[in-house]
Amino acid sequence: MTAPSTKLDAPLLGEPYLLTPGPLTTSAKVKQAMLRDWGSWDGEFRALTAEMRSSLLELTGDTKGELDCVPMQGSGSFSVEAMLGTFIPRDGKVLVLSNGAYGLRIAQTLVYLNREHTVINKGDYMPARADEVTAAIKADPAITHVVVVHCETSSGILNPVKEISDAVYAAGRKLLVDSMSAFGAVPLDINDVRYEAMVSSANKCIEGVPGFGFIIARKDELEAAKGRSHSLSLDVHAQWAHMNKTGQWRFTPPTHVMVAFIEALRAHKAEGGVAGRGARYTKNRDTVVEGMRELGFETLLKNRWLSPIIVTFFCPAHPAFDFDTFYDLLKSKGFIIYPGKLTVVDSFRIGCIGQMDEHVMRKVVAAAKEVLSEMGVDTAVPPKIALIERAKLAD
Ligand SMILES: *Cc1c(COP(=O)(O)O)cnc(C)c1O
């Protein structure tokens, strides 16, 4: 088992590192915070809920008090569904920008919600650009809202949300953002990138454990959303109004998860907020990408599109390479990686988020090198078609 690194509040000895985009490796402090039971209406717990909401709002750059934060029980997808059902009027029409599994899930959610929508489907990773958004809106004036995924975790691409936001508001439409896997590590400053609402969850870049998500939205949009939701439990307006009135969640909150999240938020602040967290993840990514490239591995994306969240690597072309064996051997060395989601070429992903630093990432590369040698793979160079794929991306 690989020994945990020194500087970070490392995971408990003997646990494998989760190189996955949430659930991820959390600190001992975050885990320890869950060893106490809390009454959900108790004043102390209500104070923690208030602290959480204001700490999250601090990360948005909202100095005018235009935004509010509404936590929502469930995994991240529950919050995405809550956001879509609450902020898109029943007679609205949505343009979904999809370049991976999470974009497609948004479109699928809109089917359930009975909201009219159209999809720019760019396939496995190609990003939709501003000119395509502008053209789509021009071609279909019924479009009222655009939804974009900030970091599309299925490939790891960082979508160009700023240019998309500018295009959406230049056309007089509204933007909703799934910033699930980016918020807290990649800047999403409201003064720079306008949006009506965005969503993220406890178990991504803030480094909490899974159990709830949160919606950050303009207060005027929240006001306007009263009575609109299709769902009792996923009604963001109702949760917001109740929380503002009573300080409590409407229905049973995940108390242990939230108290752990408070610990994670305090650590996030101590690390230097979005900038500090983003710097560590960027270093993690650079270390793993550089090391893996030395072994012959290639990334799916050109450098400019790589996020500091998760990186997709092509599987080697070598006939002795087998993903399941690679996975199992890496796990036996203390690292859990993530299978890929590309349809054209075999791939796998390595997450850069969680309680890990560059020292851990160096150990990941060393472990990958050992595993390749144990498998009898002398080079990790991918098949030619992989590089043809990559060439389709803009520089
Ligand atoms: C993690 C994630 C979600 C939510 O997934 P859940 O499994 O429901 O937590 C949504 N969008 C993106 C981009 C994500 O990375």
Image (cartoon, rainbow, N blue to C red):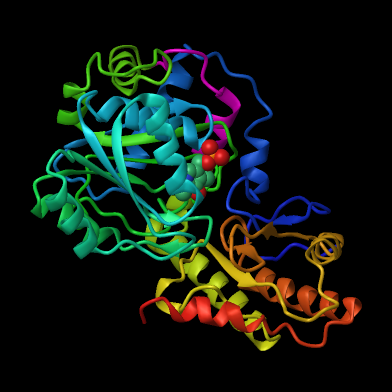
Q: Horizontal placement of 88 versus 119: left or right?
A: left
Q: Nearer the viewer, residue 90 or 200?
A: 90
Residue 84 drawn above or below residue 194:
above
Say which residue appears at 10% left-offset and 51% top-offset.
171
Residue 205 position in % (x across, y down): 49, 51
State whether residue 265 appears in this view: no
State whether residue 24 appears in this view: yes
Total count of labels: 0
Say which residue appears at 69% left-offset and 76% top-offset.
362
Residue 334 position in % (x across, y down): 80, 61
Q: Nearer the viewer, residue 384 or 213?
A: 384
| Quadrant (top left/top right/bottom left/bottom right) for the C terminus | bottom left
Q: Horizontal placement of 91 versus 273: left or right?
A: left
Magenta stretch: includes residue 117: no
Residue 175 drawn above or below residue 367:
above
Say which residue appears at 31% left-offset and 19% top-offset.
229
In the rendered image, which quarter is residue 232 located in?
top left
Residue 292 drawn above or below residue 187:
below
Magenta stretch: includes residue 260: yes
Q: Read off the magenta span.
A: 248-262
Q: Nearer the viewer, residue 261 or 350?
A: 350
| Quadrant (top left/top right/bottom left/bottom right) for the N terminus | bottom right
Residue 367 position in % (x across, y down): 79, 73
Say which residue appears at 41% left-offset and 40% top-offset.
106
In the rendered image, which quarter is residue 146 located in?
top left
Residue 273 position in % (x across, y down): 40, 55
